Image: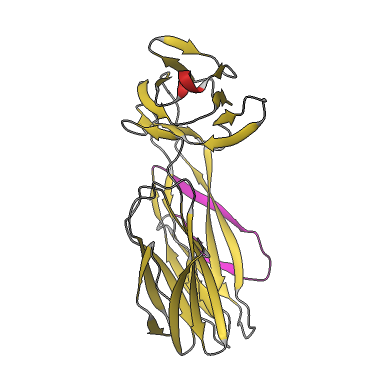
Amino acid sequence: MASENFIYQPTTGSGSGTITVTANSNNANGTDRTATLTITNGAVSKNVTIKQKYRPYFTQNAGSTFPATGGSLNYTVHTEYDVVFRSVPTWITISQNGTAIAEGQRLTPTEADNKTFTFTAEANTGESRSVGTTFNMGHYLSTGLCRYVSYFSLNQEGAKPTKKMSLSPILIEATSAQTTASLTLTVENCTFDHMTTSTAGTFVITAANPVNNTIQITFPANTAFTSNRGYLSFYLYDTDGDAYTATITVERAACGGITTDVDNILFEYNETAAKTLNVLTGGEWNSSITDNQ
C-alpha cells in the first residue's frame, strides 16, 4: 500500500540491503504524521515506525547555535494558550522588545502568540554545551492546567575544541560461526583508552589500538531467531584530561529472521531529506508502507 506522506525504495531486495525513506513535504498540520514500514521474508516480518513531527509552537528565526563569545538569537512563539518558559539554563536570558522575561513568568496569548523573543547567551570558555528536554515552554489553559509542553534545544559553541567520535551502528550477519569484526573510529580532539560493553556475552572486545583508533569485536555464533544487541561505550579524553562518553549499538542479526539497524525513522516538520535503514535477512525480502494517520 502506498503512503501519502512518505516515499520509499526499493520495494524488494535480497540478503543485505538499504531502504531509503523520504518525507513528501513539510508537515504544517497540528499532528504528527506516522507510518509503518513493513519488511517481509516469507512468513517473517519486521516493522519500522516512520514519523514526521508537526510544526512546533516554537520556531527559530535565524540559526540554532550561539557562538562561543556569546550573543543573541531570535525565536517566534505560536500558541493560543498562556505561555511559561521553564528550566532556563543559567547562561541564557530571555527578553521581548528589550523587556526581560523571567523564568516562570506567565504570558497571555496576546503577549506571546506570533511574538519574537530574544535569547541571549553569555560567553562560553569551556566546551560546546546544549540544553534539550529540560528546557521547555508550557502552554496553559485559563484554568491553570498545562495543555502542551514544547521541548526544544539550545546550543552554544565552546572556546575549547569539542571531543568527537564518529559512530555508526554495527550490524553483523547471522551465521553459525563465530565472527570477528574490525572497527576504525574517527576521533577528533581526543583519544580513547577505555571501553566497556553493557550486555555481557553478546560480544567481546578482542583487541584495541587507541593509537590507530581501531578495535576488534568478536561475536559468538547466533543461530537464534532473534538478534543479539548490545552497546559499546568509549571514554574519550582531551589534553586537559576531561572525559566524554560515546556509545554505539552493536548487533548480530537474527538467524532466519529480519534485522534492521534502526527501529524508528524520525523527520522534523520541515525535513524532507532522505534517510536510510539497513536490512539483514536471509533470502528475498519485500517492503511496504502504510500511513497510520
Report whether residue 177 is seen: no
Indicate whether residue 190 is drawn in magenta: yes
Residue 208: % across, % down: 50, 62
- Residue 149, quarter of picture: top right
Q: Quadrant of the N terminus?
A: bottom left
Q: Nearer the viewer, residue 46 or 179?
A: 46
What is the magenta range?
189-210
- Compared to residue 32, the image places residue 145 above or below, namely above
Residue 219: % across, % down: 57, 75
Residue 50: % across, % down: 47, 62
Q: Nearer the viewer, residue 4 or 249?
A: 4
- Compared to residue 27, the image places residue 36 above or below, namely below
- Compared to residue 201, the image places residue 115 above or below, namely above
Report whether residue 197 is seen: yes
Q: Residue at x 33, y 59 (%)?
A: 24
Indicate whether residue 83 is drawn in magenta: no
- Residue 122, quarter of picture: top left
- Compared to residue 56, the image places residue 193 above or below, namely below
Q: Nearer the viewer, residue 40 or 242?
A: 40
Q: Residue at x 49, y 52 (%)?
A: 32
Q: Residue at x 53, y 36 (%)?
A: 150
